[in-house]
Image (spheres, rainbow, N blue to C red):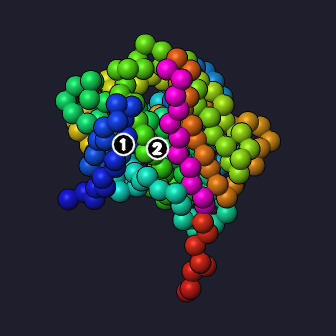
Amino acid sequence: MTDATTLTFDLPDGSTRDVVVHTLLNAGYAGRNQEEVAAHIAELAELGVPAPTTTPALYPVSPYLAQQTSSVAVQHGRTSGEAEWALIVTGDTRDDVLLTVACDHTDRELEVHGVAWSKNASPDVLGSAAWTLTEVADHLDRITLRAWADDVLIQDASLADLLTPDHWLDALAERDLFRAGTVLLSGTVQMAPGVEQFASSWRVELHDPVLDRRVSCSYTVERMPSPIG
């Protein structure tokens, strides 16, 4: 049986929702402008990161790596987060889907050997609060996604830069993965040039300017002791 974890989300109406995660997926190369995505893939190839066989990509991640935590343990200094949104399926219909903020912490040393491997080396950190997708569906593109590394703004975009939740919900349905306990992260947005991404702390925020509210997650990055042997 696949390992699972339980996440708890606070909803705007004051209720909470517990979700046992059975399937965790990370989207990649998921920009809405796929020409820009292709240019980004070419840049990554120069750094040794293998190109995907198709875009957008979708990487399975061990379910226990979906975490609501304030600390992420890493093995070395070349890891970093990525600002993302996350869909949490809690039932059988799209009315049962939650939207929250997430940070996909990634091992950049391992990434050059395989993106899927790097996604399984560190947790996906999710916010403790969520919105129902239906209540923000009519203004999703106005919601902003921002990330700070060591309190320096490193990512700042809107959800209009990424493929839509509906795109990914259709993809889940096609693969028979639209079921309670599935969590999908959106893929990330462009990082600011020249900003240090190998930071000791990360904070990511979704801001809904229409309903004037925010959801966020934050954590520190802790180095493990050096291995013996």
Which residue position holds label 1?
A: 9
State whether residue 96 appears in this view.
yes
Mark 1: secondary structure: strand
Residue at position x 73%, y 36% in the image: 192
Residue at position x 61%, y 69% in the image: 223
In the rendered structure, find residue 103 and report the number of the disc placed on it: none
Above or below for 63 versus 84: below
* Rendering coords of residue 165 (x, y %): 41, 25
User: Label 1: how many residues lie within 10 Å, few (<14), some (14-19) or many (20+)?
Assistant: many
* Rendering coords of residue 129 (x, y %): 42, 40
Residue at position x 35%, y 20% in the image: 134
Above or below for 74 versus 188: below
Label 2 with label 1: CB-CB less than 8 Å: yes
What span is in magenta?
211-221
Examine the image and state in which quarter residue 87 appears: top left
What's the amino acid at mark 1?
A: Phe
Which residue position holds label 2?
A: 127
**Quadrant, the C terminus:** bottom right
Above or below for 90 versus 95: below
